[in-house]
């Protein structure tokens, strides 16, 4: 791992040596070709080639070669990073130590890199700690409000610093958009949140008025409760029974889309009307009865 880190600061010693060898080889080949071209005859070229080979072979035996500065630096960088791994590059303390080591070794550019990285990561860590502390404080100040829900969705709410928020989305909820739990649930009608859920699920694409949507949703809710008493649906969740209630209602024409007329089909901005006809329900043993208050009850009837 240290080798891969060291490679961030230039080529390795092996890469430098190989590149130097390739460069020297190309230069010697060029010099040889130029020398041969200057010879007057093939015999002279042979003598020149032989002499060149002898001189090239003896060249390495005399004198002390100069050490390449790039190779010296590559070797020293690998020595300084011998005990460094990838995780250390995210540790401000380790980075500060490396900055000092590179500075002492005479590599200011690399020392500055490690020092800057140490400061940056330390600042990021501090910012993260502060944000987490604020988050924990915010969480501790959140108190669930059991007496109210969001009027439009039925979602739970919590209070923080005297203000209400949607517990599901975190969005601020104005007081006028809250509804008391006491007003949501009653013995004879489904919860407002359930009615809203049914409307959103099945009635969004209809053109029923808001009041009519409320009636249809309550009807579907009561119909689903009745279906749950059937043997095939006893252990099924209410969502399954609601889906079956919608299916049966549309098949029987209780909830239906009237057929297109010439006007609705060819005139822009006109829509086909939807109709709600609970009186068409003939299913046995359950039949809906709407009382004077507009509430639906599913009444058991017997087959004649």
Image (cartoon, rainbow, N blue to C red):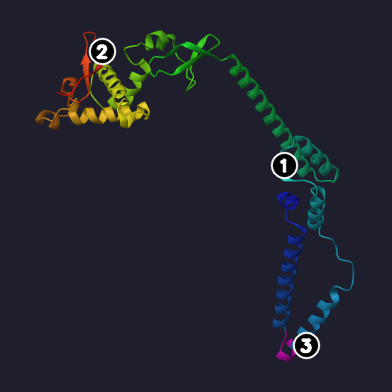
Neighbour tally class for label 3: few under 14, some 14-19, many 20 plus, Cα within 10 Å: few
Q: Secondary structure at mark 1?
A: helix
In the image shown, does 180 or 241 lie closer to the viewer?
Answer: 241
Q: Position of residue 238 (x, y in %)?
A: 36, 26
Neighbour tally class for label 2: few under 14, some 14-19, many 20 plus, Cα within 10 Å: some
Q: Which residues are magenta?
A: 39-45
Question: Residue at 24% of width from left, 25% of height from top?
Answer: 206
- In screen coordinates, is 185 left or right of 203? right
Which badge, 2 or 1, is on the more N-terminal residue? 1
Tell me if residue 42 is in the magenta stretch: yes
Q: Position of residue 249 (x, y in %)?
A: 22, 27
Which residue position holds label 3?
A: 47
User: Quick check: can you spot residue 100?
Assistant: yes
Q: Secondary structure at mark 2?
A: loop
Neighbour tally class for label 1: few under 14, some 14-19, many 20 plus, Cα within 10 Å: few
Q: Secondary structure at mark 3?
A: helix
Q: How far apart are the alpha carbons under marks 3 and 2? A: 118 Å
Which residue position holds label 2?
A: 295
Residue 265 circle label: none
User: Quick check: can you spot residue 180?
Assistant: no
Q: Is residue 98 above or below residue 77?
A: above
Question: Residue at 64% of width from left, 24% of height from top?
Answer: 132
> In the picture, residue 103 is in which quadrant?
top right
Which residue position holds label 1?
A: 87
């Amino acid at each position: 791992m240290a080798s891969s880190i060291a490679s961030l600061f230039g080529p390795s010693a092996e890469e430098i040596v190989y590149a130097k060898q390739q460069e020297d080889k190309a230069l010697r080949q060029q010099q040889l070709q130029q020398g041969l071209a200057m010879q007057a005859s093939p015999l002279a070229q042979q003598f020149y080639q032989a002499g060149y080979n002898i001189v090239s072979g003896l060249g390495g035996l005399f004198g002390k070669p100069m050490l390449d500065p790039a190779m010296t630096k590559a070797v020293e960088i690998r020595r300084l990073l011998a005990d460094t791994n990838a995780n250390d590059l995210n540790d401000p303390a380790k980075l500060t130590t490396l900055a000092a080591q590179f500075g002492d070794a005479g590599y200011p550019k690399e020392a500055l890199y490690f020092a800057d990285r140490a400061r940056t990561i330390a600042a990021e860590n501090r910012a993260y700690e502060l944000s987490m502390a604020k988050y924990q404080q915010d969480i501790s100040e959140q108190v669930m409000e059991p007496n109210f829900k969001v009027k439009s969705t039925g979602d739970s709410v919590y209070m923080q610093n005297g203000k209400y928020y949607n517990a599901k989305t975190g969005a601020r909820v104005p007081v006028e958009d809250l509804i008391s739990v006491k007003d949501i649930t009653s013995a004879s009608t489904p919860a407002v949140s359930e009615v809203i859920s049914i409307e959103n699920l099945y009635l969004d694409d209809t053109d029923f008025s808001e009041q009519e949507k409320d009636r249809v949703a309550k009807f579907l809710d009561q119909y689903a409760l009745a279906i749950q008493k059937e043997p095939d649906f006893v252990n099924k969740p209410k969502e399954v029974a609601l889906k079956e209630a919608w299916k049966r209602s549309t098949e029987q024409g209780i909830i239906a889309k009237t057929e297109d007329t010439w006007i609705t089909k060819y005139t822009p901005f006109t829509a086909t009307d939807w109709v709600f006809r609970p009186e068409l329900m003939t299913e046995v043993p359950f039949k809906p009865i709407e009382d004077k208050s507009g509430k639906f009850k599913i009444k058991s009837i017997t087959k004649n």
